[in-house]
Amino acid sequence: MGGETLVLGSARLHLVDGLPLLRPEEQVFEAMLAGWRNQQLARNLSFGYVSDQERTVRAFARHADGLPWEWAPQHVEEWSVDLRSVRGCARSTVRNYQGAVRQFCDFVTNPAYSWSEECLLRFGTHPVQVVHDWNAAVHADEGEGEPERRAFTRPELEAFFDYADEQVVRVRGKGRKGWLPAFRDAALFKTAYGYGLRRNESRMLDEVDFGPNPHGREFGDYGTLMVRHGKAKKGSPPKRRSVLTVWQWTPVVIEE
């Protein structure tokens, strides 16, 4: 390489100089995605997040019926309209999808990675940024939930928990084997509500995560919950936090 330092994700690391390709358009696009994946993983982004980003870019390429060096801003606008009017995606979903395409275009147009130069040599054109402030959704509010979404009222919540408990009794009364998963689900719903847990936080709970609270001795060994798999910031490990038990019925559910 003559002492040249190559940046992770650059074209020179994924394509051999001067080597003709059997399917140049497809192979260059796949090499771009592979380089972008490596660049994101080097930033400590999670594998799931990186895969979602790649899946979004592939979906955009299929909708645009073209490859990155053929994309234009109108492709983003047509795709965004389709996401909202045909697929019925939420505003936050559209914004996240646009963000994935914007990040990919930032990567392939960055001179440090040489993808524009590679495309000029092979196709006579090069990729450009197609997602701009004037054709993309703006994150203007932290709370983006639709007004139709609301919390359960207390009667609705009690009815939901009662229904989950009734499923355990119903299945077990028929002598079927499915009563144990039904019991698990009922306990999981109550625990998630009792501690305000996200889906993955609930899924990753373990017995050792519960402990006593010296200021709430009435809860026994279940006065505190250590959430070890909280929502992570970009490029960081899962965030930990402690949640205090507030409902008298929560320890009963956990102990049972």
Image: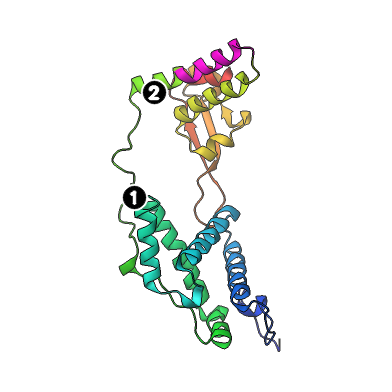
Pick out the residue farthest to the left: 147
Q: Is residue 188 above or below residue 142?
A: above
Q: What secondary structure is marked by label 2?
A: helix
Query: In screen coordinates, is 133 left or right of 252?
Result: left
For the residue marked with disc 2, what is the amino acid? Leu
- Image coords of residue 224 (percent x, y): 52, 28
- Main SS of the magenta part reads helix
Earlier-in-chain disc, 1 versus 2: 1
- Image coords of residue 153 (percent x, y): 33, 25
Tell me if residue 248 can be seen: no
> Along the line of sight, which residue is nearer the eye, 63 or 121?
63
Q: Is residue 253 above or below residue 231?
A: above
- Image coords of residue 16 (percent x, y): 69, 82
Query: In screen coordinates, is 234 left or right of 143?
Result: right
- Specify whether residue 255 is painted magenta: no
Quadrant of image for the C terminus: top right
Residue at 59%, 76% (x, y): give it.
Answer: 25
**Residue for badge 1:** 142
Other-residue count near label 2 (Cα within 10 Å), few / some / many at <14 / 14–19 / ≥20 = some
Residue at 43%, 57% (x, y): give it.
Answer: 96
> Along the line of sight, which residue is nearer the eye, 104 or 81?
81
> Along the line of sight, which residue is nearer the eye, 218 or 229?
229
Other-residue count near label 1 (Cα within 10 Å), few / some / many at <14 / 14–19 / ≥20 = few
Q: What secondary structure is marked by label 1?
A: loop
**Which disc number belongs to residue 18?**
none
Tell me if residue 104 can be seen: yes
For the residue marked with disc 1, what is the amino acid? Glu
Q: Is residue 88 above or below residue 167?
A: below
> Along the line of sight, which residue is nearer the eye, 140 or 24?
24
Q: Which residues are magenta?
A: 163-175
**Residue for badge 2:** 157
